[in-house]
Image: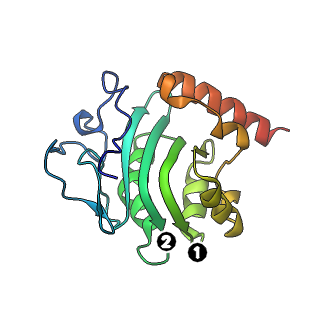
Amino acid sequence: MHTLEPHYQWRHLYIASEDDRSPFYGREYSEFEFTNAVYNYVIHPQWDEFGSATLYTKILYADYIAGYAILEFIGEWNDYLYNDIMFLKREVIEPLIEQGIQRFILMGEYVMNLHCAEDDYYQEWHEEVEDGWIALVGFLPHVLEEFHRARIDYYLITDPLLDIINWRQMSPDRVLQAVSLCVKKRLNP
């Protein structure tokens, strides 16, 4: 897992540690020292920790004028043991909402497992972005199935079309356009 880096092709457009509105403003990263791990597997030092023992993120892009953010994740999303959604909501999402972010695009190709508990924080997040949405892109099928089984997908937008978006080849604005189109189709069939 230590070779899986956060997507870096948009760094010329946005760097969360240099954005004074980002919850990760001022963070410093090592290119050589691996300090964070998911269980016994070290992860690349560019991932940001936010209080979870098994889930890490990276804000790849935030546009406060357009009101959207793209976040990538790695690890195990575990609400049972580590209450990951609480830490994510309080430490990352709330500061972004306070800055005007209403649309969240969550990239989950590197989320290996999901263990959902209560839906309180998901519901709260959904209600706080009443004019926006939370879309999941690229999550593994068994992870999406767990969201469905736990009925958390009521608060999150999942769609097979979102999983075929080749987002790494696109600009952030094009990703927003593609996801927005899927969201509109889902909300207005």
**Circle 2: residue type:** Asp
Q: Which of the pair 125/54 is nearer the observer?
A: 54
Tell me what residue is drawn at x 45 percent, y 46 percent.
Answer: 97
Q: Nearer the viewer, residue 19 or 82?
A: 82
Which residue is pictured at 44% across the width and 44% down the height? Answer: 72
Q: Give the image quarter of residue 163.
A: top right
Most distant residue in the bottom direction: 81
Q: Is residue 16 left or right of residue 28?
A: right
Disc 2 + disc 1, Cβ < 8 Å = yes
> What amino acid type is highlighted by mark number 1?
Glu
Crowding near the residue tagged with mark 1, few <14, some 14–19, many ≥20 C-alpha atoms within 10 Å: some
Q: Label 2, on which residue?
A: 79
Labels 2 and 1: the sequence-earlier one: 2
Q: Residue at x 65, y 32 (%)?
A: 180
Q: Which mark is residue 99?
A: none
Q: Is residue 156 above or below residue 163?
A: below
Secondary structure under badge 1? Answer: loop
Assign a secondary structure to mark 2: loop
Q: Horizontal and vertical percent for residue 157?
A: 67, 48
Which residue is painted at 71% across and 44% down in the image? 159
Between circles 2 and 1, the one closer to the viewer is: 2
Q: Position of residue 151 (x, y in %)?
A: 70, 66
Q: Residues within 10 Å of mark 2 (few under 14, many from 20)?
A: some
Q: Camera-side residue: 16 or 21?
A: 16
Point out residue 22 in the picture as x, y percentages from the top left corner.
31, 42
Residue 154 x, y percent position in the rendering: 70, 58
Image position of 166 with respect to 128: above or below: above
Identity of the residue furthest to the right in this view: 189
Q: CA–CA distance between discs 2 and 1?
A: 8 Å
Q: Which mark is residue 118?
A: 1
